[in-house]
Image (cartoon, rainbow, N blue to C red):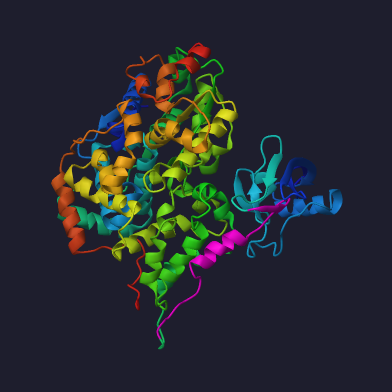
Amino acid sequence: MEPKKFTLRIQRNEKKANGSLETKWQEFPVEGTDTTTILTLLESVKGYQDGSLTFRQSCRSAICGSCAMKIGDRTRLACKTHIGSVVDEGGVVSISPQRNQPVLKDLVVDIGPFFAKVHQIKPYLQDGPDSDTKVGASAYEQVNNVTQCIMCGSCYSDCTMSEVSSDYLGPAALAKAFRFVSDPREGRKTERLKALSEDKGMWSCVRCVQCVATCPKDVKPMEAIVKLRTRGMNKGFMDGVGQRHAMAFHEDIQKTGDLNEFTLLMRSVGIVGTLAEMGVAFHLMKKGKIPSPFPHKAQGIEELRSIYRDLEANPLDVETKAEEVVPE
Amino acid sequence: MSLEFAYYPGCAAKQVQKEAASSAEAVADILGISLKPMPRATCCGAVSLRESKPAFSLAVAARILSEAEAMGHDLCTICNTCLQTLSHANYRFKNEPDILDGINAVLKKSGVRPYQASIKVHHLLWVITEQVDPELLKKKIVKPLNGMNVAPFYGCHSQRPEEIFDGRKGEKADQLDQLIHALGGQSVHYDGKDKCCGFHVMLSDKEEMRTMVGENCLDAKNSGAEIMISPCTLCDMAMGAYQKPAESVVGKSINLPEMNFAQLLGVALGVDHGTLGMDRLHVDPSAALKKRNV
């Protein structure tokens, strides 16, 4: 392949004496082929153009997770990203530090807050049985994706909820939690599900699927979050807006077929919550945006009631396809 | 080429966002797209049903897909979340034969026609940008946008996860941009265009939801947007109806008219504003349209 000219538009960040951050953008011309990695180009900038450019790197093989940074519109590993796949028509790509974490210098962030979230879910086995536990293939298969996590922080950087909430656990920590909730050797699964059901835990995921799209190791954090929610509800941790909201759907589908948006609010947030929403309700009413209490009725609803009853009596595992794991 | 689809507007378009449905139906009619009603179709369940009752959610989706299949058509929707939910189920049915068999056995027991996994799920926006002859669209435009700066807000559930959307571009989705250009407008590039509207945490994480709405709208506005459009009835609800409540959370006035893509397309195609439900928008777009002589 012929070498081409590209431009790296790099965000330079410098901490001032008063603690504030000075940010500016600087362009560096570089040369490479379409498959040259961003990391190689950053190294060439540091080696031949500006030795003060600061970034993290180590393994060069997408396994240490050090070089995650925002490249183009998404957070990626610099060592795994080919320049040709991210530049615009003019051959330019913007590079900036990971989001949602404090920036220390140039492309380096303080990864402390990210790891604090991971530690919050207790990323180790607790109180397993004293005797041997057989771990079957199906138990392993269901955590196949989440065990590939290299803690690079890319998902946390692109998480749309983490952007607006510093308290939210975030995708990587929740994916890790799923790995322990699914481990046959783990002794505190129910306790974990209870903790994850609390405010700013698994129910605060907005399900934008950005973490699934961003993850360089196919961890699919949001898929793990969906499964955690199912397990939490199955264990009876129903005391939350998210849970009550989720439970409304199967009731309505059997009743009329369509979601009853009128009563959904009441069922999700209760009377006090509904009163609190009244300001917004009045605002919506002005434009006729209050749903009818009598939604459209679909034909053949009795079929759905029958299917529902059948599945309650004869459960079908479509999610994990794994054996029920004991002990609790 | 005949463009006939089993039409699945989704719950929001039948209730609070009915202007999206009337607009979609009007523009489809003008562009020669026939949208056939699905009398048996229910709510898709969204990810909520997948969380509470995973197997039931697949059965509900299979029953909807099967109705479209029996009609002999692919399915076409105007809601991103319905699009994602039905595409996700369809992807599983096409790639996991054991799941399809298991769910079909359940359907049969309750007298529902089994699903053969033969159809595709489309968004009306994709049909318009991929299947309608661009020359026909061009010919039907009576009020071009005259260079109006329009912010595309894609919404998460028509882009991700990429593998379920039949090889569409995901991260590099450009259907709204294509449409804006076709109508004579300029599409605005801004960071928030593929972010989340917050609809699904509207009740559980209220402040966070409003911050998402506020930040995305401000981002678009500061990038020069005169109007914002989305292909999703739920994004419309969030970015439009909740824009005012969001203003008090982000502490700034925004005042960016937001509408469904079918409404702006309808304006360009000369559909009357009553059919398009323009009076139901929370931020009045009249001034923005007038400024560009639209």
Q: Is residue A301 left or right of residue B12?
A: left
Q: Is residue B9 magenta-colored?
A: no
Residue A254: x, y in percent? 19, 48
Residue A116 among those drawn in magenta: yes
- Percent from the top left, x then y, of residue A146? 49, 64
The location of residue B195, given as percent across then percent down, is: 51, 41
Determine whether, in the image, residue B238 is placed left or right of residue B148: left
Q: In the displayed structure, does residue B73 sit left or right of residue A115?
A: left
**Residue A152 visible in the picture:** no
Image quadrant in which you'd find residue A217: bottom right
Q: Do we see residue A99 in this rendering?
A: yes
Image quadrant where residue A22 sits? top right
Which residue is farthest bottom? A131
Question: In this picture, which residue range is highlighted in magenta?
Answer: A102-129
- The x and y percentages for residue B104 are 24, 54
Q: In which quarter of the image is residue B198?
A: top left
Q: Residue at x 71, y 35 (%)?
A: A90
The foreground one among B112 and A218 is: A218
In the picture shown, does residue A224 fall above or below B185? below
What is the count of numbered marks? 0
Residue plotted at (40% across, 82% down): A134
Would you say A315 lies left or right of B227 here? left
Front residue (pair B202, B158): B202
* Closer-to-camera residue (A26/B137): A26
Q: Which residue lies at the image location 35% right of the left edge and 50% below the top edge?
A: B47
